[in-house]
């Protein structure tokens, strides 16, 4: 998952990192899609050496696609995986190495997140299934009433029908995508076949070496890829100009790409914010995220601005520090700090503190994946000075958002009701109808108008026919209102993309708690009041008041230990399989004041075995993915570990706007206790079940007549396309054209051994069947492959012999970035500035978050007493003088580019960040920041509030123009003629 909002943040701040993918059209013949591309032809997207597929990012959307019907069987799901993978390969066309990495057993630090997701997924599926069951019962009731069928009683027929529905196979359980399940075994076998099929049928694959790291190889897919890249860099014969690409959807791949210090690196991902417009085409288009161009932006963004800084600027070290800072905003292993959120500009705030601190430090915060804790403590202490203001601001934003959503929803509901009344001529006279429970006891009357009576008669009849579940549902529906049952699933899915959903949280009864009337959300911490630190630990960690001080330091130490673990994981691999952060919430930034002298050490540990992970992360509802011997441990009341499988658990919104972002409050597992009872069942497993619980190595598959096979023949491992030696063979990168490592013949008893023939493993229709290959036909050879161990610790540096490409950013663009960074900063939140306007009794907050600006109006009474005006008045500002960033008619990108994307952007007249004609038509375009006539008059922002000059955002300055008269002049960003 990584950092929510990171991709959007970077793509807006650094627009050139994103580029379109050229994808050839496919030809559809019957039900078959024939790629229009020739794999051997030059790649219109540029040539690529190595492609790495994070296969879980392919398997998930192929098995349960959003907004589409899922394939009806697992075998057809795997055909969809083949089809999607081929699409990716035709775009990238790697020439040397293809690595397909599936998530294996994860470190314990990741298992806690997996556990929360899988329990939440199972609970959501149960709710959806119950809703479907009630809908089917309602439909059947209507049919029976209409038909007037006689014989069996209506109650008996419904009971039989309900039993039949319960016995129907339910929706496919996506929790099967976890190491150790039968599905993952089937997936690995299918991929081995597909790679062999492509080597036999695609001439462009002849010299390609394909590594498959399936779920039996420990480690997350993306981190197995990282281990491979580090191992190749450590080979003395490695080509430092090798080009790399990772396919995957997780935002943390951006950090991983930077952490390799391989500049020729890019990511391939779907553009989740854009849909292909071609008629009948439901595919999301691909985009490139270019790490080399991101490095160019970071070179300017991170460059020191304090002339007293004595540390020489080192881009590689600066990038490592930037990655470290981003971990506090979010990662897969730790909750983010409460005051850190990408959308609030937290990355920019942390970077500004880092840059200002470098003048007082003697070194960077990190060095080759190790953390200087004293400097980390110093940075977080400075950040903590802004923490309360940021948290209070976040809470105000959330409340305002929910009020606006409630108002919008109310207007929509009123409009829908009015429309229905007009269309249907609804009568408002109420009629009374009795309601009975299953024992025949009256539960009261319900008042309905004619329309409601017609619509709900069947529900009431069903309730009175002893269907207790439906009756309870009906009573709930009537209590909430006639539209309460109409909760479309698509709105929830859409909310996850657009983040427009509202949440319903029960208010607390505590009289000392602030309850926001619009939402019922209970703010027990109250960050805007003194004592918030104690309240935070008392409410989130259930500490007593006299325990808070000791607890907060312990939590901060564990958290910082976690940050060190994550950094080491990114740069050197997993340092401990057993370590995990033992809390659901992060500490506050001010609690890291005693970490400077702590020692961070991790003891040796081994990964879990697949069944041990399954028992750690799956709920009882997904127990069918495990061998039968384990299931009673998850479901029987007398199980010694039943406490780890609660059916009901709490969700804490923790200030978020959407329920799906809530913290899942599950009990942490005691590993020793769990393993004791799981391992006691191993003797009862069948041979096939034991096989699925085995850890293995990667395999490499290649063409028996390709260059790699010829190298093996020279080294005596193969003869005439056949493997003849059983001894391990160590190969370097140069002799194999890019694949250093050890290969050896597989154990004949190993289930993954490639037999001379290649058999299609799936049970699908004849039209979907793919060919098998007999021994004399099969050109694919499979060997066990071992990633080489590094002789020394990985270093954050460019390798000797690397030839840097030309800069993509122009001199003007680089200067613009540097000026933007000079101009950013404020004392209480260094990513924005507040300007007071006492005439209107309001403040307008101008947020500078990357390459776009936004306005928010905040009530003056909601602001804490600011000490900002003196700072603003005394700050000399940066010189405007017709334009660090575009001059008097330039906007951000000199008149023509409409912000930071295409000419006229996406804005049109009503704007958006990329619009065409200034603020009235988009934040960035046309005639300067203020656009055509400025935000409030004149030309450019300096001609906005109160007129003045021909400002332009970086032009005549908005120093003089904000408040007055004809002041624009040469004010600069915060200086010049004062406000």
Image (spheres, helix red, strand yellow):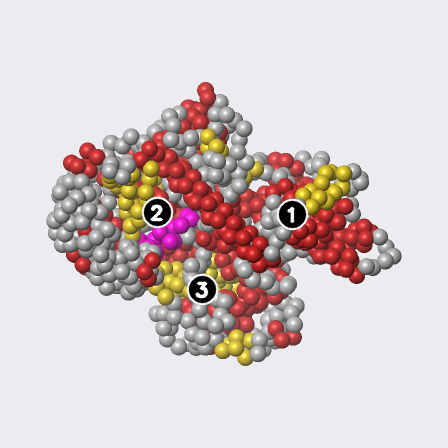
Closest to the observer, 231 or 809: 809
Q: Earlier in the sequence, mark 3 or mark 1?
A: 3
Graded by Cα atoms within 10 Å as few (under 14), some (14 to 19) or many (20 or more), the crowding at tag 3 reads some
Measured from the top left, where is residue 146 in percent x and y? 77, 60
Residue at mark 1? 429
Q: Earlier in the sequence, mark 1 or mark 2?
A: 2
Residue at mark 2? 323
Secondary structure at numbered mark 2: helix
Graded by Cα atoms within 10 Å as few (under 14), some (14 to 19) or many (20 or more), the crowding at tag 2 reads many
Q: What residue is at 30 percent from the left and 58 percent from the top?
A: 921
Query: Is residue 11 located in the magenta-colored stretch of the structure?
Result: yes
Measured from the top left, where is residue 346 in percent x and y? 34, 43
Residue at mark 3? 275
Query: Is residue 490 located in the magenta-colored stretch of the structure?
Result: no
Instruction: Report if residue 455 is visible in the image.
Output: yes
On the rendered image, what quadrant is the C terminus found in?
A: top left
User: What range of the chain is rendered magenta?
Assistant: 3-13
């Amino acid at each position: 998952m990584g950092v929510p909002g990171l991709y959007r943040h970077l793509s807006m701040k650094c627009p050139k990192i994103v580029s379109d993918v050229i994808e050839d059209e496919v030809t559809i013949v019957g039900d078959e899609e024939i790629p229009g591309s020739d794999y051997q032809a030059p790649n219109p997207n540029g040539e690529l050496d190595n492609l790495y597929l994070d296969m879980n990012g392919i398997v998930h959307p192929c098995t349960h696609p959003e907004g589409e019907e899922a394939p009806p069987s697992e075998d057809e799901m795997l055909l969809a995986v083949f089809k999607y993978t081929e699409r990716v390969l035709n775009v990238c066309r790697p020439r040397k190495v293809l690595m397909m990495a599936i998530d294996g057993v994860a470190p314990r630090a990741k298992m806690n997140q997996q556990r929360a997701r899988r329990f939440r997924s199972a609970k959501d599926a149960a709710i959806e299934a119950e809703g479907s069951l009630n809908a089917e019962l309602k439909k059947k009731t209507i049919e029976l009433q209409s038909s007037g069928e006689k014989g069996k009683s209506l109650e008996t027929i419904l009971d039989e029908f309900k039993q039949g529905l319960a016995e129907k196979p339910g929706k496919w359980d996506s929790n099967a995508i976890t190491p150790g399940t039968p599905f993952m075994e089937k997936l690995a076998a299918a991929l081995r076949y597909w790679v062999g099929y492509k080597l036999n049928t695609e001439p462009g694959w002849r010299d390609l070496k394909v590594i498959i790291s399936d779920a039996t190889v420990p480690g997350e897919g993306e981190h197995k890829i990282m281990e491979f890249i580090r191992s190749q860099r450590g080979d003395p014969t490695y080509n430092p100009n090798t080009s790399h690409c990772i396919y995957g959807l997780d935002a943390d791949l951006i950090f991983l790409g930077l952490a390799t210090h391989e500049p020729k690196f890019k990511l391939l991902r779907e553009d989740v914010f854009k849909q292909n417009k071609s008629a009948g085409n439901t595919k999301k288009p691909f985009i490139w995220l270019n790490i080399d161009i991101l490095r160019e932006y970071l070179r300017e963004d991170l460059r020191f601005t304090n002339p007293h800084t004595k540390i020489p600027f080192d881009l590689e070290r600066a990038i490592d520090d930037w990655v470290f800072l981003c971990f506090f905003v979010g990662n897969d292993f730790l909750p983010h700090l409460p005051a850190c959120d990408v959308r609030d500009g937290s990355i920019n705030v942390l970077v500004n503190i880092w840059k200002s601190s470098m003048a007082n430090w003697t070194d960077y915060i990190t060095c080759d994946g190790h953390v200087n804790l004293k400097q980390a403590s110093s940075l977080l202490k400075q950040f903590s000075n802004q923490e309360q203001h940021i948290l209070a601001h976040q809470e105000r934003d959330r409340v305002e958002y929910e009020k606006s959503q409630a108002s919008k929803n109310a207007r929509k509901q009123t409009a829908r009701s009015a429309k229905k009344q007009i269309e249907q001529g609804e009568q408002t006279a109420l009629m009374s109808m009795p309601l009975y429970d299953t024992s025949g006891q009256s539960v009261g009357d319900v008042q309905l108008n004619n329309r409601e009576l017609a619509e709900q008669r069947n529900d009431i009849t069903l309730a009175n026919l002893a269907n207790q579940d439906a009756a309870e549902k009906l009573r709930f529906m009537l209590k909430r209102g006639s539209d309460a049952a109409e909760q479309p699933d698509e709105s929830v899915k859409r909310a996850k993309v657009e983040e427009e959903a509202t949440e319903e949280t029960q208010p607390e009864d505590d009289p000392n708690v602030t309850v926001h009337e619009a939402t019922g959300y209970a703010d027990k911490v109250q960050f805007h009041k003194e004592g918030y630190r104690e309240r935070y630990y008392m409410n989130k960690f259930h500490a007593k008041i006299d325990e808070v001080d000791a607890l907060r330091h312990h939590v901060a130490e564990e958290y910082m230990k976690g940050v060190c673990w994550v950094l080491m994981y990114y740069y050197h691999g997993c340092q401990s399989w057993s370590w995990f952060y033992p809390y659901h919430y992060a500490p506050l930034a001010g609690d890291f004041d005693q970490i400077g002298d702590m020692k961070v050490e991790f003891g040796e540990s081994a990964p879990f075995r697949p069944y041990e992970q399954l028992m750690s992360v799956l709920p009882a509802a997904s127990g069918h993915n495990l061998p039968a011997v384990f299931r009673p441990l998850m479901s029987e009341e007398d199980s010694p570990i039943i406490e780890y499988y609660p059916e009901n658990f709490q969700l804490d919104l923790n200030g978020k706007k959407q329920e799906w972002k809530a913290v899942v409050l599950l009990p942490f597992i005691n590993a020793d206790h769990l393993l004791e009872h799981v391992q006691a069942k191993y003797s009862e497993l069948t041979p096939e079940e034991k096989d699925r619980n085995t850890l293995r190595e990667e395999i490499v598959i290649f063409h028996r007549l390709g260059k790699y096979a010829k190298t093996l023949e020279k080294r005596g491992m193969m003869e005439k396309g056949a493997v003849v030696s059983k001894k391990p063979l160590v190969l370097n990168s140069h002799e194999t054209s890019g694949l250093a490592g050890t290969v050896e013949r597989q154990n004949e008893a190993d289930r993954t051994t490639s037999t001379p023939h290649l058999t299609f493993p799936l049970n699908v229709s004849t039209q979907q069947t793919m060919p098998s290959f007999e021994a004399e036909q099969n050109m694919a050879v499979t060997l066990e492959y071992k990633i080489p161990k590094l002789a020394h610790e990985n270093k954050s540096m460019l390798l000797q012999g690397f030839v840097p490409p030309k800069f993509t950013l122009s001199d003007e663009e680089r200067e613009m970035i540097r000026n933007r960074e000079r101009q950013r900063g404020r004392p209480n939140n260094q990513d924005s500035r507040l300007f007071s306007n006492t005439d209107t009794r309001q403040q307008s907050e101008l947020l500078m978050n990357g390459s776009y600006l936004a306005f928010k109006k905040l009530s003056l009474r909601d602001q804490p007493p600011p000490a900002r005006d003196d700072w603003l008045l005394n700050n000399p500002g940066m010189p405007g003088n017709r334009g660090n960033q575009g001059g008097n008619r330039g906007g951000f990108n000199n008149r023509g580019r409409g912000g930071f994307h295409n000419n006229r952007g996406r804005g049109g007249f009503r704007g958006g960040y990329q619009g065409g004609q200034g603020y009235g038509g988009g934040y960035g375009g046309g005639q300067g920041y203020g656009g055509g006539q400025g935000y409030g008059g004149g030309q450019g922002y300096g001609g906005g509030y109160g007129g003045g000059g021909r400002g332009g955002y970086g032009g005549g300055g908005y120093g003089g123009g904000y408040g007055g008269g004809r002041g624009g002049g040469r004010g600069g960003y915060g200086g010049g003629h004062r406000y």
